[in-house]
Image: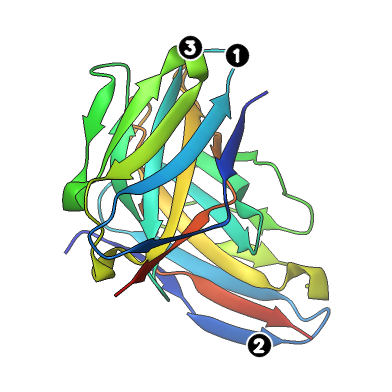
Amino acid sequence: EAQVTQNPRYLITVTGKKLTVTCSQNMNHEYMSWYRQDPGLGLRQIYYSMNVEATDKGDVPEGYKVSRKEKRNFPLILESPSPNQTSLYFCASRPGQHSYEQYFGPGTRLTVT
Amino acid sequence: AQSVTQLGSHVSVSEGALVLLRCNYSSSVPPYLFWYVQYPNQGLQLLLKYTSAATLVKGINGFEAEFKKSETSFHLTKPSAHMSDAAEYFCAVTRNTGGFKTIFGAGTRLFVKA
């Protein structure tokens, strides 16, 4: 089944403890992206990747890191999480430059205390 | 700069009534426009998209949207609401000049009353 998977689905952590949220797609898509969803703000783009070893900042990149070493994986890294990063996170993928619809993962609900 | 405005954070309709969810955008170049739906505890699913072909776009589950350049609008409609339509709906815009920057509206939660 074609899909985007994320792990974990739920995570509660403490301030400053490094964490990684994994994202994987099995559709051979070139583009991948991370969003955070907050009430009343919709989805805001954190980082995106156009292909392996090609990443760029979205609108809210502060406090996050990403890497794209393989085409199928695009992990989101929080080196020192803070409570304002408590949010619902979505990974998405898109086939390529001329195909604009995105396919979303199920989401990761992160709570930082 | 691009922006997306969805009028009404909550919309309530009766089952069988018309659904109208409003979306206005601003973009310095012709955009690609999308409506996504999010059911509780799920990710977003594509409802429909406008990519500079027909201005009236039909999507899944009986939804459609019309691109009106003069009004910079892309409102989502469905003639007859069903209980299963209750969800959150997001309008999004992507520039058609390449790249991956996508701007989402704040979302509209649709309630359907029996």
The residue labelled by disc 1 is B28
Q: Position of residue A26 (x, y in %)?
A: 27, 57
Q: Is residue A62 left or right of residue B74?
A: right
Seen in the picture, residue B16 relative to A31 is either above or below; the reply is below
x, y percentage for residue B8? 57, 50
Residue mark closest to the camera, 2 vs 3: 3
Left or right relative to B36: residue A34: right
For the residues tagged 2 and 3, is the chain the same? no
SS of the residue at dot 2?
strand
Mark pair 2, 1: CA separation: 41 Å
Using the rendered image of the protein, determine whether residue B4 is visible from the camera's viewpoint.
yes
Return the residue nearer the eye: B56 or B114: B114
Residue behind mark 3: B70
Q: Earlier in the sequence, mark 1 or mark 3?
A: 1
**In the foreground, A110 or A40:** A40
Question: Which residue is denoted by mark 2 in the rendering?
Answer: A12
Identified at 60% across, 14% down, the residue is B28
Tell me the quarter of the image containing the C terminus of chain B.
bottom left
Chain for mark 1?
Answer: B
- The three-letter code of the residue at mark 2 reads Ile
Chain label for disc 3: B
- Seen from the viewer's position, the closer of residues B114 and B43 is B114
Above or below residue A22? Residue B8 is above
Three-letter amino acid code at the position of disc 1: Ser
Taking B85 as reference, is B23 left or right?
right
The relative height of residue B27 versus residue A30 in the rendered view (above or below) is: above
